[in-house]
Amino acid sequence: MSNVYQKSCVVANAYGDAQAVVAVSNYRGVSVRVHGGPTLYKSRPDGFWDVVNMHTCLDANILPGTTRACFGPTTHLPGKSIYSLGEVQYNGDTTWKWTTSPIGYVYP
């Protein structure tokens, strides 16, 4: 959707906790209906990734010129590589739009 942007990131603290975040900004001249949220992944020793949690917290109209963020639950993951995937649907469309964050590391 033109003039609507979404970003994903991971927020981590110094205590080994992390949470996935997805933010949607509306630069259109009209409201946009959104539905979705972030999924947090952690690394496994074999090089694959496990889903830590999935969270749906965006289900609203975003007014023109505003941004809405959705924070997943805080999870204790010291010593893990992590990333987030943001999944959002717009205006009732059943197609998901995805964004991923860079891979980060949660320090123990």
Image (cartoon, rainbow, N blue to C red):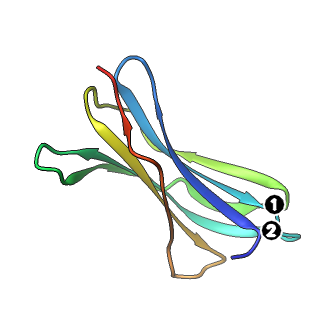
Q: Tell me: 70 left or right of 68.
A: left
Which residue position holds label 1? 63
Instruction: From the top left corner, tell me how far across and down residue 48 is, in percent.
Output: 19, 54
User: What type is the residue that disc 2 sits on?
Assistant: Ser
Q: Tell me: 5 left or right of 17.
A: right
Q: Please, is residue 60 above or below residue 68 in the view?
A: below
Residue 74 visible to the viewer:
no
| Number of residues whose C-alpha sits closer than 10 Å to that of mark 1, classed few (under 14), some (14–19) or many (20 or more) | some
Q: Nearer the viewer, residue 69 or 100?
A: 100
Residue lying at 81% horizontally and 60% vertically, measured from the top left: 63
User: What type is the residue that disc 1 sits on?
Assistant: Leu
Quadrant in the rendering for residue 12: top left
Look at the numbered disc 1 and give the secondary structure of its residue: loop
Residue 12 visible to the viewer:
yes
Q: Which image quarter holds the C terminus?
A: top left
In the rendered picture of this protein, how many numbered marks are placed on residues?
2
Which residue position holds label 2? 31
Q: Are marks 1 and 2 in contact (CB under 8 Å)?
A: yes
Q: Please, is residue 32 above or below residue 48 in the view?
A: below
Residue lying at 27% horizontally and 44% vertically, measured from the top left: 42
Which label's residue is closer to the chain start, 1 or 2? 2
| Number of residues whose C-alpha sits closer than 10 Å to that of mark 2, classed few (under 14), some (14–19) or many (20 or more) | some
